[in-house]
Structures are given as structure tokens and as C-alpha cells.
Image (spheres, helix red, strand yellow):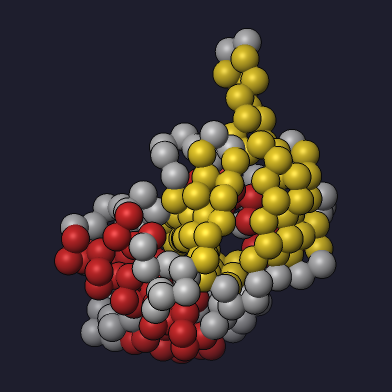
Amino acid sequence: MYQLTGVTKQYRRGKDTVDALAGVDLAIGDGDRLVIQGPTGGGKSTLLQMLGGLDRPTAGSVVLDGVDLATLPEARLTKVRAESIGFVFQSFNLVPTLSALENVETALVPLGLKGAERRERAAEALRSVGLGERLRHLPAELSGGQQQRVAIARALVKNPKVLLADEPTGNLDESMRDEIMDVLEELWKEHGPTFVMVTHDSAIARKAPRLATISQGRITVTENASAA
């Protein structure tokens, strides 16, 4: 699935050059569930952006199914993101003027599906996350947990090969955190995408079958045989 080799990402900060990632090597297999944890500014979100083709490394390769995202032309990279990668963000990123159904449909527009099929698939995705009765509600009419469920449905409606989640429970209280994690885990078991999640939450990290700890741009991966 993924093979990262020597991935480095440098940023300019005034006169200084900062390494957000410093020669990261990482393999992620089909259907893996990997959690990335580390301090603020340690490179977690930068690594996720590389996996999602949202940013390119300064050096190194990010190979997804034999294709190096680091060197792919922008038009092809956009196509890969639209077809193969689903994203869930901490801030939900829902369009406030669109209903839950319409927000989920937006993920299907680049695939060229007709309106009726988009609506049918979007409704089924919302039902799968327990929001079958909230199809016409605007984001402002939904709780934080419900908004994140809409975002999860939007990410999964296109049946992506990869699901990337950046602090998906960061804006939720503890009970809602557990609820959203249960939803994500059940959907991962059902659909089987490769699932990579960034979190600062140690309670989530302890349950991960694979944990990547990143600090100062360097990464260490540990296996947790006892994880569910």
C-alpha cells in the first residue's frame, strides 16, 4: 500500500530552516490501522498530509500502490485523492449552507456520478453512521458528534482505499470521543480501508495495533499485539 523512503519536509522560519520530517521511512500495508502520536509541532499532521497527497516532501518518496505521490503531476494527484483517499478532520470541514446529505454528496461529484446515484449513496453512508433521520439537517442543527459522523460518511461514501483522520476526536468530549472511535473502528472492520489517524489522545493510542511515535521529524513504530 504505502512505502515512504527518506521523506523529508523542510520549512523556512525566518532565516532558519526547520525539518518537519527528517528522513522518515515507513511501510503501511493494505488494511492496516496505524495511529500517529507525538508532541505538537513534531510532524504528525505533516506526515498525514504527505500520505494524502496534500503536500509534497522536500526529499524522498511517498509511494501508494506503486505510484510516487511526491512526483505525480497535480492533475493525476487530484484524481488519486478524489478516488482513493478519504479525509476526516478535527474541525469537520462541513459546508454550513449544505444539508448533511448534500455535504456527503460533495465527495462523489468528482467521480462523475449522476445525481440520483449520488443521493442514494450519500443517504446510505449517513445511515451507516446512525444519521438516517438527519439527512436534511444543516451542520448548525447537529451536535459536534453528529457533525463528525457526517464528515466520516463523506470520507467513506466513495469507498476509498485509504482513510486518513487528523485529530478526529479533538473537538469532542470524552463520551463523544469514545462514540466516534467506535464508529470509525466498526466502519474500518466492515469496509477494510487502510486507516491512518493522528491523535494526541493517549487513550486512543494505547488501543492501536500499530503506533507510530513521531518527534522532531523522526519516527518510531511499535506493534501492539494485545490491541483489539
Q: Is residue 45 above or below residue 65?
A: above
Quadrant of the rendered image containing residue 100: bottom left
- The image shows a total of numbered marks equal to 0
Quadrant of the rendered image containing residue 158: bottom right
The image quadrant where one finds the C terminus is bottom left
x and y percentages locating residue 189 in the rendered image: 46, 85
Query: In this orientation, which residue lies closer to the viewer: 136 or 148?
Result: 148
Q: Is residue 96 above or below residue 153?
A: above
Query: In this orientation, which residue lies closer to the viewer: 158 or 64?
Result: 64
The image quadrant where one finds the N terminus is bottom right
Q: Is residue 186 above or below residue 45?
A: below
x and y percentages locating residue 78 in the rendered image: 69, 59
Residue farthest top in this picture? 15
x and y percentages locating residue 57 in the rendered image: 71, 42
Query: In this orientation, which residue lies closer to the viewer: 139 or 30?
Result: 30
The residue positioned 34% from the left and 86% from the top of the image is 127
Residue farthest front in this picture? 225
The residue positioned 63% from the left and 38% from the top of the image is 21
Can residue 68 be seen here? yes
x and y percentages locating residue 155 in the rendered image: 49, 70
The residue positioned 18% from the left and 58% from the top of the image is 173
The residue positioned 51% from the left and 70% from the top of the image is 33
Can residue 154 be seen here? no
